[in-house]
Amino acid sequence: MRRKLVAGNWKMHGSLAENKALLAGVLAGMGDVKAGVAVCVPFPYLSQAQAGLTGSAVAWGAQNMSQHAKGAYTGEVSASMLKDFGCTYVIVGHSERRALYGESDAVVAEKFAAAQAAGLTPILCVGETLEERESGVTEQVVGRQLDVVIAKCGVAALARAVVAYEPVWAIGTGKTATPEQAQTVHAFIRGRVRALDAAVASGLVIQYGGSMKASNAVELLSQPDIDGGLIGGASLNAEEFLAICRAG
Ligand code: PEP
């Protein structure tokens, strides 16, 4: 039985004061949440997350990391640095990183491998653009994004990872994939993994991400292959985020 995981992706939002209030609000409402919960915060706030969440039911992580272990990479942050701040998770391959910072499938796979080598659980984001969906190549795109990671790390590596299906056209746009659209792709992802390793496939947590909010979470999370959510905008409001967590 897979336990659902709801993770907030704060993106480049927050301040010490705002985060304090948000974390306090989330912690105060965790009593009736059954799903696993995490927040992926901007790098400078990792110590605040560690201080505020240690010993609680909320895990924390980062939104990106370097594929390199150390060295002359000005401005980069390594996986071991994230471990130093108690991170459990790190998002790799978010569509904003792929589109705005040119991260290729190969770089994403390197980041995935480096995260696991440091003991972090990568949340691997995959998903198609609107153009790709309309051209009927959603499964080709998502399959390729997944295959590159499997080719580099092996299918067994997915036993220590989370996959987030995030249709690019649904991220931050208010356009959510219908539960059926999302379920179809989630089932495709699980099927692709199952063809290589049935046990890994049945244990794999596959989150949905893309304008998930309190009002659509129950329906999305009741789909058989949707095991949680990666939540952007709605994770910045404690009540909204908690309502999604409770739906999980
Ligand atoms: C995301 O950035 O991962 C995301 C799903 O954003 P939003 O929920 O705002 O669409």
Image (tube, helix red, strand yellow):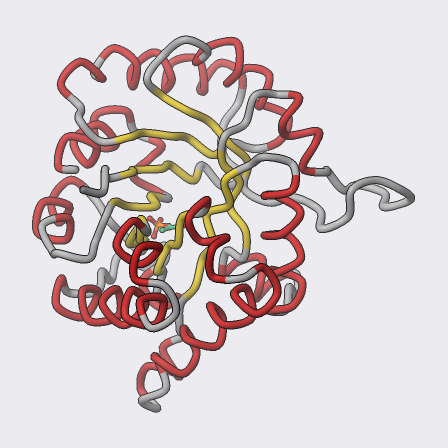
Estimate the x, y position of residue 23 in percent, counting from the top left. Answer: 38, 17
- In which quadrant of the rendered view does residue 35 lie? top left
Q: Residue drawn 73% across and 38% down? A: 77
Quadrant where the image shows the C terminus: top left
Name the outermost residue toward the right: 72
Q: Describe residue 113's horizontal placement relative to residue 9 as left or right.
A: right
Looking at the picture, does residue 174 appear above or below residue 99? above
In the depicted view, which residue is nearer to us: 189 or 160? 160
Estimate the x, y position of residue 18 in percent, counting from the top left. Answer: 44, 19
In the depicted view, which residue is nearer to us: 17 or 153? 153
Looking at the picture, does residue 107 appear above or below residue 57? below
Q: Residue drawn 34% across and 80% down? A: 139
Quadrant where the image shows the N terminus: top left
Estimate the x, y position of residue 226 in percent, counting from the top left. Answer: 21, 54
In the depicted view, which residue is nearer to us: 174 or 132? 132
In the depicted view, which residue is nearer to us: 71 or 119? 119
Estimate the x, y position of residue 4 in percent, counting from the top left. Answer: 23, 39
Q: Describe residue 28's horizontal placement relative to residue 64 as left or right.
A: left
The mark tally for this picture is 0
Q: Residue drawn 35% across and 60% down? A: 165
Q: Residue drawn 57% across and 66% down? A: 99
- In which quadrant of the rendered view does residue 30 lie? top left
Looking at the picture, does residue 220 appear above or below residue 21? below
Name the outermost residue toward the bottom: 135
Q: Describe residue 79's horizontal placement relative to residue 185 as left or right.
A: right
